[in-house]
Amino acid sequence: MTTKEVADTLVKLCSQGKFDEAAQSLYSPEIVSIEPTAPPGESREANGIAAVRAKGEWWNKNHEVHSVAVEGPLVAGSQFTVTFKMDFTFTPESRRMQMEEIAVYKVSNGKIVREEFFY
């Protein structure tokens, strides 16, 4: 797949709430995922598909998502960006919040090899 095809597929799946399916079908086994901050005692960086899946499982167990809006993609060469706007509750604290983040993705050989989030 081209970068544009990967980007369009990611936006389509995420818009349908299929985040796990997007990761399974579009991410390289060697994916690197970088968050702007790290949880206490953890790293900002997750290396490999197993670590990214574990990060997703933690998110799903600790958040109730009320709505997600996905905007984009904006494709430039082998990279693209997507904007996510989310309304969710952090369930351990029963704290509802809204967040907007920009995700920057890098594609190589038809798979996402790097993602970095900014919020």
Image (cartoon, rainbow, N blue to C red):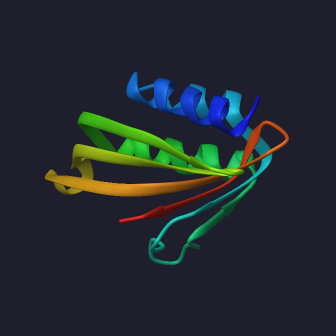
Between 34 and 102, the residue placed more toward the observer is 102
Between 4 and 52, the residue placed more toward the observer is 4
Relative image position of residue 97 (x, y in whole percent): 16, 54
Position of residue 39 in the picture relative to residue 101 (left or right): right
Between 111 and 33, the residue placed more toward the observer is 111
Question: What residue appears at the point 24 percent right and 47 percent down from the top-left corner?
Answer: 91
Above or below: residue 21 compared with residue 60 = above
Residue 16 image-quadrant placement:
top left
Question: What residue appears at the point 59 percent right and 73 percent down from the top-left corner?
Answer: 43
Position of residue 102 in the picture relative to residue 64 (left or right): right
Residue 53 image-quadrant placement:
top right
Quadrant (top left, top right, bottom left, bottom right) of the N terminus: top right
Question: What residue appears at the point 38 percent right and 48 percent down from the top-left corner?
Answer: 83
Residue 87 image-quadrant placement:
top left
Above or below: residue 21 compared with residue 87 = above
Q: How many marks?
A: 0
Relative image position of residue 62 (x, y in whole percent): 35, 47
Question: What residue appears at the point 79 percent right and 36 percent down from the top-left corner?
Answer: 110
